[in-house]
Amino acid sequence: MTTPPTADPALAVPKDWDEITPEWMTAALSATHQDAVVESVRVDLRDDGTNRRARLRVEYSAGSGPATVFVKAVDPAHRDLVRLTSGLFHEPRLFNSRVDLPLEHPTVFCALIDESAEDFILVMEDLTTRGADPRDATRPLSVEQAATGVRGLARMHGKYWGERVLEEPALGWLEPFVPWDGMGAAPLSEAQKRLGDDAPDVVMALTIDGLIEDIWKPYIRSLTKAPQTLLHGDPHIGNTYLLPSGEVGFLDWQVARRGNWSLDLGYFLQGALTIEDRRRSERHLLEEYRDALGLPADELPSLGEIWLRYRASVAHGLTLWLCTASAGELWQRPDIAIALAQRYSAAYADLQTAEALADIDT
């Protein structure tokens, strides 16, 4: 289980960044930088959205530590939305569990939870110091870059495959990936208008009820009726970064869950690549995924099963990004939302997702 909230005032979850004192930061960094004594902390940059985020500059009077850190906490204005779609505490619980995550991800120095106040804070590395390049849908990955993310997800999935994720004591808090309510209110026609002249007919014919009840919910329910593993849960391209080495890393583990591997693999690939690159390379990348799982032969899914569940997985990305694109600027920049809605729409038609859903246990 997660480390319980501390009663030490020095490590209370701060309500705003100006409450992060040198003494607080010294305590927050003590597990990884035992000799560091912080002299000053100041805000370099803040970016408040669904969560509150900031980069803090740190100076030391003794010892050494990171010159800058990145902090993340709950934005009270979006607490209900985060609770509904993500779960407030999954990310800090994951890093407090100290389980091995054998893929590229940020180093977390401290993760604190205040359950009574429905608040948390993460203090983690500032990835810019490693030359990390955060990506989004307007800057898709190359096939070679995406392959590193595929192999990373496979290593993590293989480590917690099947009974392993259920038998890992440190992940006893991990919830199954199940449908949530609230997306059925999206004005789907608004997103459909923005998809462009090349939008597939099968997507343009969808209604919001059909999208949610006949496509998304059946797929999500299937995630616990097949081999489960530890899922990142939200590995769209906007939650990735690229290192100078060409390795792709994964940010924002707030939707960490357990469920079928296909959600992570499909959601990542179908949004991270251009439509043309995805069409050209997806079968090869699925083979890369299978080869990197590191499982005994009797546990390896067949390429046929991987292909079937990958096809079905478009249901998730299509639903989330059509709903996001329907909301204008409320949840995401329109250019990002529309680009992703277009990619998942093309994949839905190309991969005959409705037919794939009919062939799996939902």
Image (tube, rainbow, N blue to C red):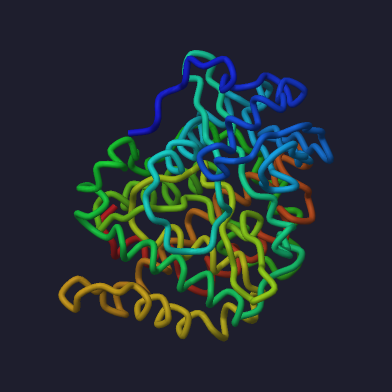
- Where's residue 149, x and y in %? 53, 69
State left or right for residue 166 relative to residue 260.
Answer: left
Nearer to me, 5 or 338: 5
Whether 287 is drawn above or below 17: the answer is below
Q: Residue at x 49, y 37 (%)?
A: 92
Viewed as shown, does residue 269 lie left or right of 128? Answer: left
Taking the spot 75% from the left edge, 53% from the top edge, the residue there is 193
State the residue in front, 172 or 191. Answer: 172
Q: Residue 355 is drawn in which quadrant? A: bottom left
Mark yes or no: residue 201 visible. no
Q: Nearer the viewer, residue 126 or 266?
A: 126
Quarter of the image where one finds residue 164? bottom left
Q: Is residue 97 left or right of residue 110?
A: left
Q: Nearer the viewer, residue 71 or 30?
A: 30
51 vs 362: above or below: above
Q: How many marks?
A: 0
Report the residue at 55% width, 50% height from top.
319
Q: Quadrant of residue 354?
A: bottom left
Q: If the image is split into quadrants, where does the N terminus sit?
A: top left
The residue sitting at the right extreme is 44
Q: Position of residue 14 (x, y in %)?
A: 65, 21
Can the viewer see residue 348? yes
Residue 151 lies, with reference to residue 207, above or below; the image says below
Q: Picture coordinates of residue 109 (x, y %)?
A: 56, 42
Q: Name the residue at 66% across, 69% down.
A: 243
- Return the x and y of residue 256 as percentages of the image width and height: 44, 45
Residue that protrudes farthest toward the front in the picture: 62
